């Protein structure tokens, strides 16, 4: 059984709310928004890397930047590293899903 996530989430208006007190829609929209944010950040870094490749002249600098760009293309960014609270938000989603499953299927 997953425990309630009581860490605080800061909303866009600056108000802080416990993750376990978020509505289902708010929780779902927040998780979706964070994945879009990480994808946007990844594309931004790739664009910056390709731009830097055009402006670098030293062989070592070019090799290092090519390596960084290639690594980013192959692996992307780790969403949990970029947004540490993402794991807590997803755990709360899972807890609610399991709770609902227990209510709908009490004999399982």
Image: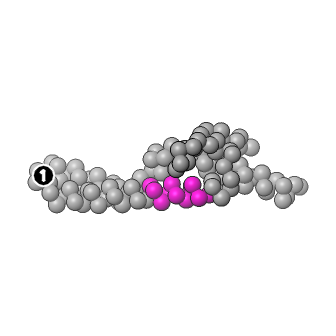
Determine whether, in the image, residue 105 is placed left or right of residue 67.
right
Can residue 100 be seen in this snapshot?
yes
Residue 20, position as x, y percentages in the image: 68, 44
- Boundaries of the magenta span: 28-38
Residue 37 sits in which quadrant? bottom left
Which residue is depicted at the point 26% across and 53% down? 67
Q: Is residue 1 magenta?
A: no
Residue 26 is situated, as x and y percent measured from the top left of the image, at 63, 55
User: Residue 54 placed where, x, y %?
Assistant: 16, 60
Q: Residue at x 23, y 52 (%)?
A: 65
According to the image, label 1 marks what residue? Answer: 59
Looking at the image, residue 12 sits to the left or right of residue 61; the answer is right
Please, is residue 52 above or below residue 10 in the view?
A: below
Q: Is residue 61 left or right of residue 92?
A: left
SS of the residue under disc 1? helix
Q: In which quarter of the image is the N terminus?
A: top right
State how many labels appear.
1
Against 28, is 84 above or below? above
Q: In percent of the image, x 38 and y 57: which residue is there?
A: 42
């Amino acid at each position: 059984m997953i425990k309630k996530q009581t860490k605080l989430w800061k909303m866009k208006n600056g108000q802080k709310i416990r993750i376990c007190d978020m509505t289902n829609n708010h929780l779902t929209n927040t998780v979706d928004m964070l994945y879009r944010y990480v994808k946007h950040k990844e594309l931004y870094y790739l664009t910056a890397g390709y731009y830097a490749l055009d402006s670098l002249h030293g062989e070592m600098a070019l090799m290092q930047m090519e390596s960084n760009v290639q690594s980013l293309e192959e692996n992307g960014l780790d969403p949990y590293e970029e947004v540490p609270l993402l794991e807590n938000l997803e755990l709360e989603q899972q807890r609610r899903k399991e709770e609902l499953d227990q209510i709908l299927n009490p004999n399982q």
